[in-house]
């Protein structure tokens, strides 16, 4: 730390303040650790939240500026007022949001965090243009990208913004990225006067916001989980950069933890789709282009009563949910079906693909909302070896994540992506609204499988008719 | 070049913290079951609202109109991130229950 801060730490208040930041950082770590186990996760969230409130209070009471002045009463009142307003609005939004809309909500909150980091960096730049310039610029750039990128992601997930993909977007994005780097270097080493530097920094702000938009714009559909978690990690990094400006341990450690966590999740998502991060960011996906193998066989339908008999006399049933289940709000009725079957002695599990839904682990949240115990939710890698012993696999509103083209068709865009091996089950029932293609726009070989039969209709209606059919047996 | 060296020397501790935090982050998160990915992301997202401390410092010492306006925006946005993030995470985690026997 520099001499100024060392001098300040000699005062008791400053020591308390510094150590409250350290304590807060430790509470974040404990919180995240507890949040990685379902049994303790809620407690972990509470620890993390407490780790946030502590430094807020100590900062308000004990922070002193460079001149040694504390926070005045009037300013403190303003701080409390703004926080109260933000807390009320944030809590109401978080309470009201539907579980299906969770990805949008997380993106939105991520955008606000990014905007806050960018704003803090901008003010710090105007106050002390020469202090910690590199991290200030990084905080500004990363925060702005996270803000505008997350807003676009929010709009897309909410169906307000469509995908724009054109080949030139890739080059445009590379150009923006390069320009941002060049401007940062110019500001740092160009030796320009104060006025010019200011213009460059404002230019950098605008450019970063534009880049955030053009970066997320072409990324569509199935790649959304990757983007959300990437943006999440950017917001953490932006907060850490701002923490660097204040030499604040809670901000640095908290921000970097989030950055690291987001990076791991991003890489896991990429792995779950068998794609590299670069490929997601600059590559096209869906909408054809690649050659497709010809589909063999024909589509067969199953009647409700046949499906009811088949399920009732099975020993092992696996339900494979996709986003279609969420759209139809069929998670509650699906739980009714599994309880009914369990009461008849059938073992029912849910097979969850890592990218089912619109964000990592989204499907788990939806099923948990419907009171499905988490022990019944089985991850892809754990259920696949057991699939040949499964009597019936029910595919509800899932498509690409069960498409055997991932194994068989080297020309398919999803070739090599890990899938749930529904095709190995003894019988397959596919619930679907119609013959439309999945989110990635690819023909699904599973539908033409000899063991597969279709049950067309809205997932919620189909399952509830199935439930009453089984009850009446 | 000299400015880089000065920067590296002056911020030695902070750089240390960053490097160690990266390892810590990887270590803490790497074994999370996918069941918890969404709540974890949302919980981590709430933690990135730690920028709220910066907001408090800025509004706390704001004097010019520019500082007041932009500081208020930063503080409000950060609070949304923190409050909304923790509440939404709690709502999700509340639903993860063990099987009732």
Image: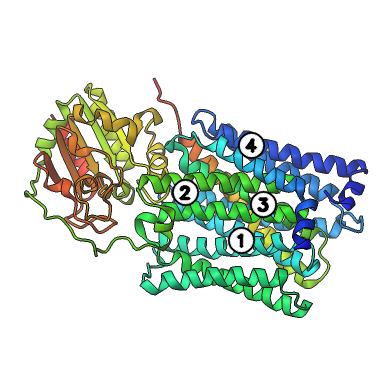
Mark closest to the chain's N terminus, 1 or 4: 4
Q: Residue A90 in the image: x percent, y percent?
A: 59, 53
Residue A143, disc: 1
Mark closest to the chain's N terminus, 2 or 4: 4
Bin the neighbour count of mark 4 within 10 Å (Cα to Cα): few under 14, some 14-19, many 20 and up.
Answer: many
Compared across the picture, whether A221 is left or right of A470 comes to right
User: Which chain is mark 1 on?
Assistant: A
Q: Which residue is mark 2?
A: A266
* Quarter of the image with the C terminus of chain A in it: top left
Q: Residue A225 in the image: x percent, y percent?
A: 42, 51
Disc 4 element: helix
Circles 4 and 3 in contact, beta carbons < 8 Å? no
Q: Which residue is mark 4?
A: A29
Q: CA distance from mark 3 to mark 1?
A: 10 Å
Which one is nearer the viewer's eye here, B77 or A174?
A174
User: Which chain is mark 3 on?
Assistant: A
Disc 3 element: helix
Bin the neighbour count of mark 3 within 10 Å (Cα to Cα): few under 14, some 14-19, many 20 and up.
Answer: many
Q: Which residue is mark 3?
A: A240
Q: CA distance from mark 1 to mark 2?
A: 18 Å
């Amino acid at each position: 730390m520099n001499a100024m801060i060392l001098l300040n730490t000699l005062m008791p208040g400053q020591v308390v303040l510094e150590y409250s930041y350290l304590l807060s950082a430790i509470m974040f770590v404990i919180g995240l650790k507890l949040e990685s186990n379902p049994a303790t996760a809620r407690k972990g969230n509470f620890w993390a939240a407490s780790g946030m409130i502590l430094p807020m209070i100590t900062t308000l009471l004990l922070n002193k500026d460079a001149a040694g002045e504390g926070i005045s009463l009037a300013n403190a009142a303003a701080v409390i007022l703004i926080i109260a307003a933000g807390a009320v609005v944030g809590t109401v939004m978080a309470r009201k949001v539907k579980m299906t809309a969770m990805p949008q909500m997380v993106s939105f909150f991520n955008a606000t965090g990014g905007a806050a980091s960018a704003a803090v960096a901008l003010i710090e730049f105007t106050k002390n243009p020469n202090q910690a310039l590199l991290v200030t610029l990084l905080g500004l750039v990363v925060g702005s990208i996270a803000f505008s990128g997350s807003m676009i992601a929010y709009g897309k997930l909410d169906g307000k913004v469509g995908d724009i993909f054109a080949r030139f977007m890739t080059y445009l994005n590379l150009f923006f990225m390069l320009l941002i780097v060049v401007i940062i270097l110019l500001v740092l080493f160009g030796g320009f006067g104060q006025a010019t530097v200011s213009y460059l920094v404002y230019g950098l702000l605008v450019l970063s916001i534009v880049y955030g938009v053009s970066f997320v714009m072409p990324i569509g559909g199935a790649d959304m989980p990757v983007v959300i978690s990437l943006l999440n990690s950017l917001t953490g990094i932006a907060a850490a950069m701002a923490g660097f400006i204040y030499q604040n341990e809670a901000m640095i450690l908290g921000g970097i933890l989030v950055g690291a966590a987001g990076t791991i999740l991003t890489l896991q998502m990429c792995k779950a789709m068998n794609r590299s991060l670069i490929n997601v960011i600059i590559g096209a996906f869906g909408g054809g282009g690649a050659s497709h193998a010809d589909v063999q066989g024909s589509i067969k339908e199953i009647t409700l009563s046949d499906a009811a008999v088949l399920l009732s006399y099975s020993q092992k049933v696996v339900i494979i949910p996709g986003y279609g289940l969420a759209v139809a709000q069929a998670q509650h009725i699906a739980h009714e079906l599994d309880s009914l079957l369990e009461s008849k002695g059938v073992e029912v599990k849910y097979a969850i693909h890592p990218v089912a839904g619109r964000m990592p682990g989204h499907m788990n949240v939806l099923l948990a909302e419907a009171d499905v115990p988490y022990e019944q939710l089985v991850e892809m890698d754990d259920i696949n070896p057991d699939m040949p012993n499964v009597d019936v696999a029910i595919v509800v509103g899932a498509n690409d994540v069960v498409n055997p083209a991932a194994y068989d068709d080297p020309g398919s865009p999803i070739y090599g992506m890990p899938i749930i091996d529904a095709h190995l089950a003894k019988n397959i029932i596919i619930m679907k609204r119609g013959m439309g293609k999945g989110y990635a726009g690819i023909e699904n070989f599973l539908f033409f499988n000899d063991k597969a039969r279709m049950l067309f209709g809205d997932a919620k209606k189909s399952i509830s008719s199935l439930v009453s059919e089984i009850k009446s047996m | 070049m000299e400015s880089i060296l000065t920067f590296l020397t002056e911020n030695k501790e902070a750089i240390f913290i960053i490097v160690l935090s990266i390892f810590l982050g990887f270590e803490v998160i790497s074994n999370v079951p996918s069941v918890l990915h969404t709540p974890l992301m949302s919980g981590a997202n709430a933690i990135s609202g730690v920028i709220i401390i910066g907001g408090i410092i800025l509004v706390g010492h704001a004097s010019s109109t520019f500082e007041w306006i932009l500081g208020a925006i930063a503080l409000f946005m950060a609070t949304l991130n923190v409050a909304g993030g923790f509440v939404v995470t709690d709502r999700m985690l509340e639903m993860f229950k063990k099987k009732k026997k």
